[in-house]
Amino acid sequence: MKGEVVFYRLFDIGASVDLDEIRRTVNIPFLSGRPISERSAPRYARFAQPLLVYVDERTLETNLGRLTLSIAVKLYGVGALAVVLRTPFGAANLREIRPFANLRIRTTATEEETLDDYAGRLVQRITEDLVPFLHDAYDVKVDPEPYTVYCVSVSETPVRVFREAQRREVAALLENDPRPDAISDEEVEDTWRNWFSYYQDDLIVLEWDAALIIEPTATYEDTLTVFELANLQLLELRVYDAFVNKVIDRAYDDLEDLFGRNLLFRSGHDMVKQLAEARMDLSEGTFQVDNISKLWGDWFLGKVYGACARKFELDSWRRNVEDKMKDLSDIYEVAHTELEARRLIILEVLVVLLFVVDLFLIAFGKR
């Protein structure tokens, strides 16, 4: 059995990015179009087109021995970097591949770091170069989104054997469980709810944070892109959820302060302005996330993406963000209404004062 393990680490960089601006001002290569696929697809199907900002190949010492890793970093306009690390493998069976799930990079003879940390250092250096191109920054930190894909291109085992006799082994691989025989039938069936075959000799099985691809022709870049985009959407929805939580917490504090002492003389203009800007940023952000890809439909990659969306519960994340945005809108309406009420009170006071001044001038003017 031969193939490669593809590790994804997706990072949010805390701001949106104008890719066109980078293309105009920086001479770097970028990915264009969508990966070539042997499978039919509707014309409207669309993949996001990130910038390829870093490519390298390194031989590193790891807890699994010396490995050669190819590294690519892609920049997305929503403000995310996808770090893709790939390493080949040769194994007798699926159990021998499972240790890759716990891959660690040796930094010294006695110390190791996780792929999250290794990729994080790379992202930090790249982000420093991107500072001039970052827009609409937001101070929200979330953990990177990890995903691992085991890609088998050479196997003496027919695909039907994996589907029938090795279902438990596949489930153990994708769940990183060292005891395949102990996994319950229900858990195995849950894993195999999301499997696909286009030809008789290929197979895709996906789980929450890992997937298995068996493809004798090794033409699976389009499938990898689907996994990447689905995880990117999950990452950004997590970011927006954290961002709207932060905005709502601050808005409640500001609203309480707004209704505090000296009610008449406290201005709510800044608060209303900040809430309006936050609502616009969130609306724009969620729109961009929804338009990262157009992959739905009853065709092969559309079905794979649909399974990812269900497994990652993207719709639940969207509803959660939308519900909180409604709460934010309610706070905005309360603050805006209060601001308008204060303006009316101040206007009425000024009218009364002008009336009093006018009476005063008339009374003393006659003398």
Image (cartoon, rainbow, N blue to C red):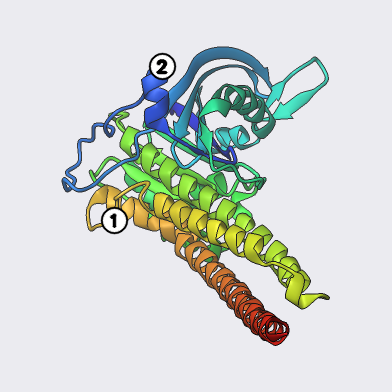
Badge 1 crowding class, 10 Å Cα cut-off, few under 14, some 14 to 19, many 20 or more, is some
Mark 1 lies on residue: 296
- Compare residues 362 and 96 and report the one nearer the observer: 362
From what the image shows, is residue 64 above or below residue 33? above
Q: Position of residue 214 (x, y in %)?
A: 37, 38
- The residue depicted at 62 percent of the width and 24 percent of the height is 128
Per the image, label 1 sits on a secondary structure element best described as loop
* C-alpha gap between disc 1 and disc 2: 31 Å
Mark 2 lies on residue: 28
**Residue type at the position of mark 2:** Ile
- Compare residues 304 and 317 and report the one nearer the observer: 317
- The residue depicted at 41 percent of the width and 16 percent of the height is 28
Frontmost of labels 1 and 2 is 2
Q: Position of residue 350 (x, y in %)?
A: 65, 77
Q: Is residue 224 left or right of residue 120?
A: left
- Compare residues 7 and 233 and report the one nearer the observer: 233
